[in-house]
Amino acid sequence: MRSTTDAVPQPSDEVAEALATGAPVVALESTIISHGLPQPRNLEVARELEGIVRDEGAVPATIAVLDGVPRIGLNEVELERIATEPGLRKLGQRDLPLAAALKASGATTVSATSFLAARAGIRVFATGGLGGVHRHWTEDQDESADLDTLARTRITVVCAGVKSILDVPATLQRLETRGVSVAGFRTDTFPGFYLHSSGQPIEWRIETADEAAAVMRGQDALGGTETALIVANPVPKEQQLDPELHDRVLADALAAAERDGVKGQAITPFLLGYLVDGTKGASLEANLAAVRGNAALAARIALAWSRS
Ligand code: PSU
Ligand code: MN
C-alpha cells in the first residue's frame, strides 16, 4: 500500500504534548491572516491571537498547509510565511488532498481548519466571522463550504456570527437545516461580525464557558451525526463599527463587486478589503476586536472542556 503520511495532520511538539496530556488547545485559522487582513498588521495579529490564547492558559494551534503538509501549530517563521508569502492559496476542505499531492502551501479557511483540527483531536476553534450564504445566492449558489463542514464535524467554533457581507438570515436558515447547533454567548441575537448584533434572533443563549462545555458533553452523549457547535460571541458595543457607516460602505462594496464581476473565492477578501478602505480602517479595528474576544472565549471554553 502506498504511504499517505504526507496528508496526515502534523502537530507541533507543543500541540502534540498538550493533546497527549489533555491540556486545553485552541485551533486558529490562517485564511484570516493571509487573505482577511492587510499586511503588515496581519502578522502582528497572528502573534497577538496566539498570545491571547496563552494568557488564558491554553495552547494555540494555528493551522495551515505548508509544502503539502497540514500543520497543526506553527512556529514563528512559519507564521511569518502565512502572513507574507505572495500568492499563498486559500484552502477549503476539498483543496486539502490536492495541496498534499502537489506539495502546495496555503492558508486554511474555517472549513479546512475545522476538519484538520477535529482530525488532530482539537475540539475548540476561534475565528472572526464564518462564511455562509452570499447575497444573490439565487443567481450563483455561492454558499461557503464552512457550513457544510460544520454540519459533519465535531468542533466548537467561537465566532462573531457570520460575515455581514453575507445574507445573514439565509445563512442562519441553512445552519438550522443542516443541524448545526447555535448558541449566543450572553446575547439573544445573532452577532453581526463588525456589529454587535445582526438583528436576527437566536433561540439559545449561554452565559459561561462551563455551559458551553456542558453543551459539548451533551453532543457527545447524544451521539449521532458529528455536528458542530457555534458559540456566537458578539463584538462589544463600544468596539463595533458605526452601524450607519457599515451599511453605507457595505452597499458600495457590494455594488463594486458586482460591477467588477468579482466572484467565488475572491469575493470574501475583496469585500473585506473594500470595507477596510471605505471605513478608513474602522472595520479592521472592529474585526480585530471581535477576533480577540473570540480567541479569549475559546481558550476559556477549552479550559472548561479539559476539566470536564
Ligand atoms: N473571519 C474573518 N476574516 C476572514 C475569514 C473569517 O474575520 O477572512 C475567512 C475564513 O477563513 C472563512 C472564509 O472560512 O473567510 C470564508 O471564505 P468563503 O466565503 O470563500 O468560503
Ligand atoms: Mn464562496
Image (cartoon, rainbow, N blue to C red):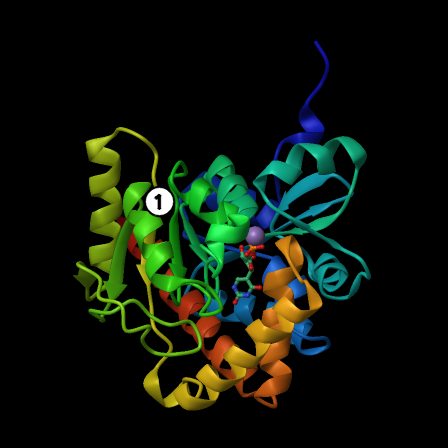
Q: Is residue 301 at least partly visible in the picture?
A: no
Q: Does 64 appear above or below 136? A: above
Q: Nearer the viewer, residue 149 or 18?
A: 149
Q: Residue at x 38, y 77 (%)?
A: 235
In front of the other: 39 or 216: 39
Q: Quadrant of ligand 1?
A: bottom right
How far from the left and from the top, in percent, is residue 4?
68, 22
Quadrant in which the N terminus is drawn: top right
Q: Is residue 177 visible?
A: yes
Vertical position of residue 119 compared to residue 255: above or below: above
| Residue bearing mark 1 | 228
As drawn, is 40 to the left or to the right of 162? right
Q: How many marks?
A: 1
Task: Return the x and y of residue 238 as percentages of the image width and height.
Answer: 36, 90
Q: Residue at x 39, y 45 (%)?
A: 155
**Residue 296, percent across and down?**
41, 68
- When asked about the image quadrant of residue 99, the answer is top right
The three-letter amino acid code for the residue at tag 1 is Ala
The residue under the point 66% across, 59% down is 266
Does dot 1 land on a helix, a strand or a loop?
loop
Considering depth in this image, is 241 or 64 the residue closer to the camera? 241
Image position, residue 129 (x, y; %): 46, 64
Task: Kindly give the residue lying farthest to the top in the view shown.
Answer: 1
Q: Relative to 41, is 115 above or below?
A: above
